Every structure is written in structure tokens, then in C-alpha cells.
Amino acid sequence: MDGEVSPEEVAERLDANGEGIRVVDIRSKPAFDRGHIPGSENVPFDQLADRIASLEGAERIVTVCPHGQASQQAARLIKSYEGTADALVESMAGGLEAWGGEIEAAEPAAADADEGPDAPF
């Protein structure tokens, strides 16, 4: 891990079309779907070891979690992987709790819409 980055710096990089930065949200898919940083990708911590190869070739990777603790562990794991050893790998300080920017939620699937019970009557 190369240290921590402020939420403000992450926002600035994303505002610059997100070039050169990959924001990796390590929360569960349901938590990610409820709200996440626009442009971030979801790689739950328990799947990170199996999906780490998908981050190969990234210039800069920022890990995100609720409070900035678990994302430090994730950043260390990512940095230890040979395919990301040359990337700048940081944890976002304070996690989503410190994020003051926009939050995006996933669109609910049609089956998830609250249209009442599926009763035959």
C-alpha cells in the first residue's frame, strides 16, 4: 500500500474524467447497490483475491470501504499482487463516511420493485 488519499483528491481525479484512477469499493454488492461513489467498481473484499487480476495494468487504484479501515487491508493485498506492483495503490482516508461528494445508487431491478404480493387473488 502506498498510503492514504483524501476524499477530496479522489473527487478531483474523478471530476477529471476519472483518467488513470480506478476506485474499488470493497463492500458487499447489496451495500454497493444502495449507494456508491459514481464511477467506482464493486469488488467485495471476500472476492478480492479471486478478482485481483482484473486490476492489472491500472496506474492508480483507490480502495474504499465504510470507514477507511478494511480498505487499507485491501490496498495492501492489491499492492502485493505482481500485476499491480507498479500501480499507485491507496486507501481513501475515512472511507465513505468522509466522502462529501455525490452518491449513486443502482437502479432496482424490475423484480425488486414493490408492487405488492404475488398472490393469485
Image (cartoon, rainbow, N blue to C red):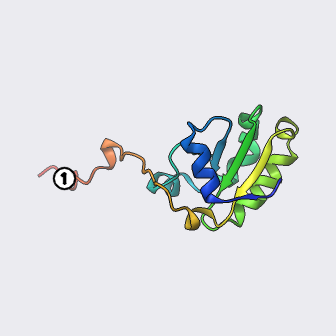
- At which x and y percent is residue 4? 75, 59
Q: Could you tell me residue 61's position as x and y percent?
A: 72, 45
In this rendering, would 110 be left or right of 72?
left
How many marks can you see?
1
Secondary structure under the numbered disc 1 in the rendered image: loop
Q: Which quadrant of the rendered structure holds the N terminus? A: bottom right
Residue at point 75% right, 36% down?
A: 59
Mark 1 crowd level (few <14, some 14–19, many ≥20, 10 Å Cα): few
Residue 43 visible at all: no
Mark 1: which amino acid? Ala
Q: Is residue 30 left or right of residue 52?
A: left
Identify which residue, 108 or 2, lies in the foreground. Answer: 2
Q: Residue furthest left?
A: 121
Residue 48 located left or right of residue 121: right
Q: Residue at the location (64% across, 53% down)?
A: 9
For the question of whether residue 30 can be seen, the reply is yes
In the rendering, at what x and y percent does residue 94 appear?
64, 67
Task: Kindly identify which residue carries mark 1.
Answer: 119
Position of residue 119 measured from the top left corner of the image (x, y, whole percent): 19, 53
Q: Residue at x 75, y 53 (%)?
A: 90
Of 116 and 40, which appears nearest the observer?
40
Q: Is residue 29 left or right of residue 88?
A: left
Quarter occupied by residue 82: top right
Residue drawn at (76%, 46%) of the image: 49
